[in-house]
Amino acid sequence: MKVNFTMWQKALNIIPEVSKEEWDQLDLVSRWLISNARRGADHDFSFSRLAGIFAFRDHAFHLELGWL
């Protein structure tokens, strides 16, 4: 499974229609972006969650302080 930056762009601009075969070939981030868009999630909110995950991973997020 390789990173598909083109699909990331599509998922941010539209809700792409993908077949089962295409879905199986997508990387994790592409799947996440498409599934969130399909649920009607607001992309800004989705990206803030993703940013929080990355900050937590890098030990830069503290629940009591927020972003550092």
Image (spheres, rainbow, N blue to C red):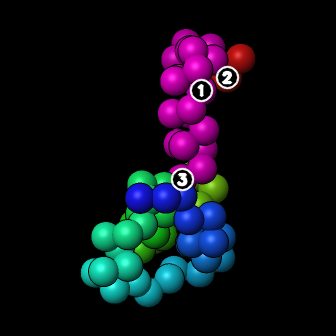
Residue 39 appears anywhere in the view: no
Q: Position of residue 66 (x, y in %)?
A: 62, 21
Magenta stretch in the rendered image: 46-65
Circles 3, 2 touching at the beta carbon (< 8 Å): no
Query: Which residue is tagged 2?
Result: 67
Say which residue appears at 59% left-offset and 81% top-offset. Answer: 14
Q: Position of residue 22 (x, y in %)?
A: 38, 79
Q: CA distance from mark 1 to mark 2?
A: 8 Å
Element carrying mark 2: strand
Whether residue 48 appears in magenta in the rendering, the answer is yes
21 shown above or below 2: below
Instruction: Tell me the amino acid under the disc marked 2.
Output: Trp
Query: Which residue is tagged 3?
Result: 46
Q: CA distance from mark 3 to mark 2?
A: 16 Å
Give whichever of 48, 12 is nearer the camera. Answer: 12
Element carrying mark 1: helix
Q: CA distance from mark 3 to mark 1?
A: 14 Å
Q: Relative to 23, is 64 on the left or the right?
A: right
Residue 49 appears anywhere in the view: yes
13 shown above or below 35: below
26 shown above or below 15: above
Residue sticking out furthest to the front: 2
Which quadrant is the N terminus positioned in?
bottom left
